[in-house]
Image: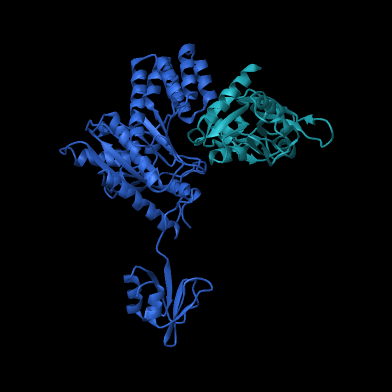
Amino acid sequence: MIPEGMRDVLPPESGQLRAIETALCRRFEAYGYGEVRTPWLEYAETLETVEDDTLEAGYRLRDQQGHELMARTDMTVPVARLAAARFRDRPLPLRFFYVAPSIRPWAPQRSQDGEFEQAGAELLGLHSAAADAESVILLCDCLAALGLRDFRVALGTVAFYTALVDSLGLDDDREKFLEALADRDYPLLESIAGNAGVDQDALKVLWRTLELSGTRDGLSQVRKMASSDAMDDAIRRLVEVRDLIEDAGFEDAVTLDFGLYQDLTYYSGVIFEAYAPGVGLPIASGGRYDGLLQRFEWDIPGVGFAIALDRLHEALEKAGAVPAAAPTCIAFAGGLDEPARAMELRRAGWAVAALPDGAPPPPRPRLHRSGGSYVFEPAVGETVSGSWRDVLRALGIA
Amino acid sequence: MKLGLACDGGPPPLQVLDLLERAGLPAGSLRFEAGPAIVDAGEVTWLLAPGADVLEACSRGALDGGVAGKDLLLELAPQVHELLDLRVCRDVLVYATPEPGAGVLGRGRPRVATRYPRVTRRHFAATGRQVELVAFDAAPLAPGLGIADGVVELRSRLVLDDGGAGAGRPAALRVREEIASCSARLVAGRAARALGGERLADLVGSMRASVEEI
């Protein structure tokens, strides 16, 4: 038995996940990101620095000195902590990536495992739209490299809504309003706004932008409606990012979504989520978090994303693009007693599982010794029997 | 386009079908279809199924959108976006107890029969009271059986079905508290917008116009 919400991963899925991870690491490295590994236990205080309900709700325990520890609930905060502690004297920007699990208490209605593996990349020290764009481009490149074709990245901005909501004059209901925005509970938004006596013109802007999509027409409409410099800046930024992503050749993969809003408190600007057919929840999400490192007393900006590996695996399954887990393995009955022969095959690139002599026939491809000769059965109905040299020839070795 | 409509054994509610038709969707033939079923109507494939199933299918990315009741959205808190209040099938989730003198003891921790355990627990906890939940689909019958002191149910369901023709007679229950107003909602899974392009925006637009026509 294992705790609810946790799972064991078995072959061949484990091998497929490893192949996915390896492919992702190659992409991250191709952009100059360096891998970091951080402990899965942090001081609770470190994770509480961010003041986010989700991130603070981790499993807690105490060490022998009585310090309160917490199992990490995401990787962005530990990477920020590490950067602020270890890289202050390095030239900016810094680029880090990780492939690691995080743990959050599980509940039946949460559609995420209690322990979930993520592959993510963080770009620290750049304010520019070009940095936002690099993060999205890297994400698109990762997904494309794995052979996922029909994915879409929804691109939005937190800055637009914080500016818009400020202009609504909500006071007490501000938090509730932003929460309803993140959940996209539009009837609730309407009723909160109604109760607070929100200005009708500002509300009209909100409804129009929520329903607008990323077409050029839609964009110019939103810009006309922007009633403050902060809103106009947010839109201009988004367009700049989108244009750079188009330059990189991912124009078909990206759609603007003004209704995108996430209630993770550290996001401050552009945010994005990736979706793939047949998977209901985002396979990746990310965004700009300019205030996060300040919490660790180093005021540099950051942008990054994390890919949910189990959801990416599901998307690849649906798309028929799961990478091969391992080379085809030949079961060699009697191979345990002939290590030299088994090694000869392995050196030539074959995987060989050695079995005792006389083991019950395993699934094909299989090989066994019969008197002085060998019988090799690559598939049902195919048999090669003869000398060892004949076996090698059948395998394309000799 | 694939759309789900919540229905309970029979066809989906007529008011919902009217709205859909006015929005230009091929919902006419559904008046005579009983769920659960998948109905191919040319440009739209309809899933007729219980509300919880419609929400599950939306959240897992199998549908472009769906119509389900706010009562289930409150109870299940599914990973869907609630895009539009269709303002039909209006109802109220209420806490109701037998008329005084019906022989039920007052208790510090009442036993409450309901199909809505999460809503019930949250409602009572928010007001500092404890309840013992009695999971019971035909909740209005439970007090009569002596297994509950009250029920949390939609107001329109506080009737006892006699099994005869007619609509059934009212359960002898009095509404004590209103918990939440409910109505039919247009919902979509989180992925629908990103993957479906303009389709979802068009659907919300035409449904909004259809709702505001009334």
Q: In this view, does B55 lie above or below A16?
A: above
Outermost residue, left side? A89
Instruction: Name which residue lies at 46% across and 23% down.
Output: A177
Among the 4 quarters of the image, the one containing residue A96: top left
Name the residue located 39 percent from the left edge and 14 percent from the top edge.
A227
Left or right? Give the position of B109 relative to A197: right
Query: How far across and down, in percent of the image, does residue B128 sit?
Result: 53, 30
Where residue A280 sits: x, y (%)? 51, 40
Q: From the viewer's perspective, tell me whether residue A255 is left or right of residue A33.
A: right
Q: Position of residue B81 (x, y in %)?
A: 52, 31
On the image, which quarter does residue A328 sit in? bottom left
Residue A166 can be seen, yes or no: yes
- Chain coloured cyan: which letter? B
Frontmost residue, A79 versus A35: A35
Colour blue maps to chain: A
Q: Residue furthest right?
A: B165
